[in-house]
Amino acid sequence: MKPRPCPRVRRRIAQFTLCLAAGALTACALTAIAAEAMPKSGAAAALRAQYSNLRAQLAHSPLGPGLYLQSIESQRALRGDIYALVDYPFATVRDAFSSPEHWCETLLLHLNVKYCRAEIRGERTVLTVAIGRKFDQPLSDAYWAEFAYDVPRLESDYMKVDLDAKRGPLGTHDYEIALELTGLDAARSLLHVQYSYTYGLTASIAMRAYLATSGHDKVGFTMVGGENGGPPHYIGGVRGALERNIMRYYLAIDAYLGALATAAPRPFEESLERWFTATERYARQLHEVDRDAYVAMKRREHLRQQTPQQSTDHEGR
């Protein structure tokens, strides 16, 4: 029987678990920087060029055709990217994700997102998001973050959306969720989803405790190893956690789009079913609760989301 960490360490582990879930995201950082500096007509071309560079990876991805994920861990910084071919016209995806309210409906599909509400504050749009555990809990026990919502590019063949949070728990900061989109033909689009954050010494200590206890057997999607006769295996650690979260966010985007495209009479209910079914395709990485528990919890959270909440603890717990 493994020894249980002391209460103080357990609190740190719980906080770090929330930190890993708080996303609230870049395969080619240089490409992204270059796209920002380009004239408007060049941003779509840069993303399509990236698609051309990734054709082989997209065609032969172990995640399934048309879906490619990669992650990077650098000095106290984590970054992940998903490129996906989706069977929706550019205008369908653009219209869905140029609305901050639609983003809240999408983010709530993630197991750890307990609440999201869009607000206009002066000239800014802010998404107030509560991050919590994988089960029902009061919002007073959740961690609150504020994501600035921005659409820096919205063009006839290209869109970019940024969600940025300056601060996170345990000294983490600079959270970003970003989406790039361009049309490939009349029926298909290319999505690029980014997820990233940085962390300090306190979070680094909590990481080690988390990975030695409740996170020790969790894995991501990247296969590593295989050298010197050793068997290949899925990556674990903080990169594994990052990969699980970016996949959950991507699947939320896809589920939300699917519910809209099918003109479901109850789109949120349809998106719940689609998200859970999609995550079960990657059960080794993503399975946490059964379908009935997930759907019941999200129905309650969706109802709660219709009411403004007082979020006073933005410094983290």
Image (cartoon, rainbow, N blue to C red):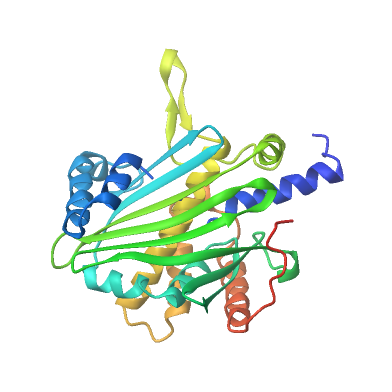
Image-based side of 113 in relation to 257, left or right: right
- Above or below residue 61? Residue 261 is below
Where, by quadrant of the figure, is residue 151 drawn?
A: bottom left
Image-based side of 192 in relation to 21, left or right: left
Measured from the top left, where is residue 251 in percent x and y?
A: 42, 60
Q: Residue at x 49, y 33 (%)?
A: 74
- Above or below residue 305? Residue 224 is above
User: In the image as oriented, which residue stretches furthest toward the left?
Assistant: 185
> In which quadrant is the N terminus drawn?
top right
Q: Residue at x 50, y 66 (%)?
A: 107
Image-based side of 187 in relation to 242, left or right: left
- Above or below residue 233? Residue 19 is below
Q: Is residue 42 visible?
A: yes
Measured from the top left, where is residue 161 in percent x and y?
A: 37, 63
User: In the image as oriented, which residue stretches furthest toward the front?
Assistant: 122
Image-based side of 58 in relation to 100, left or right: left
Q: Is residue 66 visible?
A: no
Q: Residue at x 21, y 39 (%)?
A: 56
Quick one: 63 or 195, which is closer to the camera? 195
Q: Residue at x 70, y 56 (%)?
A: 316
Measured from the top left, where is residue 121 in percent x and y?
A: 53, 76
User: In the image as oriented, which residue stretches furthest toward the bottom?
Assistant: 265
Quick one: 273 or 193, which is closer to the camera? 193
Where, by quadrant of the figure, is residue 158 drawn?
A: bottom left
> In which quadrant is the C terminus drawn?
bottom right
Number of marks in the rendered image: 0
Quick one: 224 or 312, which is closer to the camera? 312
Where, by quadrant of the figure, is residue 258 drawn?
A: bottom left
